[in-house]
C-alpha cells in the first residue's frame, strides 16, 4: 500500500497518487492544495500536519514515512557523490548542511 508523503492518505483513499524523486508520493488532493497555495491563497496546511491525522492513518503511514526518509537519505548521498565527482570540496558541501567539513566527510565518505 502506498501513502501520500504529505497528507498520509493511502492510494485507496485518493483518486490518484503520483511518485516523485526520493521515494516521495503526492496525491491529487495535495496537488490541488499546492495549486491553491501557489496562486497566493492563504490556506493553512493543516492536512499536512500529522497531528491532525486520524490515529489509523498515522499508524498506516509510519512504514511509508520511514521508507521516504530512507529514500531521501539515499537521494542526498547521490547528490553529494555527484558534487564530489565534480571536485567540489567537503567544506563547500558542508556549508549548506550547517555542519563542519569533517562532519560532512564522515557522513558521506
Image (cartoon, rainbow, N blue to C red):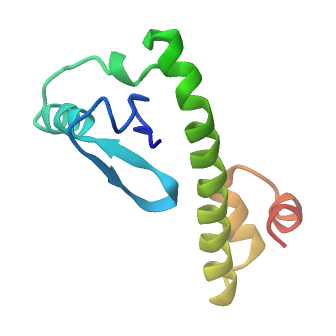
The residue nearer to you, when weighing 54 against 41, is 54
Task: Give the quarter of the image for residue 73.
Answer: bottom right
Q: Position of residue 65 (x, y in %)?
A: 57, 38
The vertical placement of 28 against 24, above or below, is above
The answer to whether residue 46 is above or below residue 12 is above
Position of residue 52 in the picture relative to residue 104 (left or right): left
**Where's residue 9, x and y in %?**
38, 29
Which quarter shows the C terminus? bottom right
User: How many marks do you count on the picture?
Assistant: 0
Q: Position of residue 87 (x, y in %)?
A: 68, 88
- Of the pair 71 and 44, the residue shown nearer to us: 71
Seen from the viewer's position, the closer of residues 109 and 14 is 14
Where is residue 88, by image quadrant? bottom right
Kindly identify the residue that appears in the image at 39 percent across and 25 percent down: 48
The reply, left or right, for residue 108 in relation to residue 40 is right
In the rendered view, tell whether residue 104 sits above or below residue 1.
below
Q: Residue furthest bottom?
A: 86
Residue 93: quadrant of the picture: bottom right
Residue at the location (44% across, 61% down)? 21
Q: Residue at x 46, y 10 (%)?
A: 54
In x, y percent, where is residue 19? Answer: 37, 56
Q: State left or right for residue 84 relative to residue 52.
A: right
Query: 97 or 65, which lies in front?
Result: 65
Amino acid at each position: 500500500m502506498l501513502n501520500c508523503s504529505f497528507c498520509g492518505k493511502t492510494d485507496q483513499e485518493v483518486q490518484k497518487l503520483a511518485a516523485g524523486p526520493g521515494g516521495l508520493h503526492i496525491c491529487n488532493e495535495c496537488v490541488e492544495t499546492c495549486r491553491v497555495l501557489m496562486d497566493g491563497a492563504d490556506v493553512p496546511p493543516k492536512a499536512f500536519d500529522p497531528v491532525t491525522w486520524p490515529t489509523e492513518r498515522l499508524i498506516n503511514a509510519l512504514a511509508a514515512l520511514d521508507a521516504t526518509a530512507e529514500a531521501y537519505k539515499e537521494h542526498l548521498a547521490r547528490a553529494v557523490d555527484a558534487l564530489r565527482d565534480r571536485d567540489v570540496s567537503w567544506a563547500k558541501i558542508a556549508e549548506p548542511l550547517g555542519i563542519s567539513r569533517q562532519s560532512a566527510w564522515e557522513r558521506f565518505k
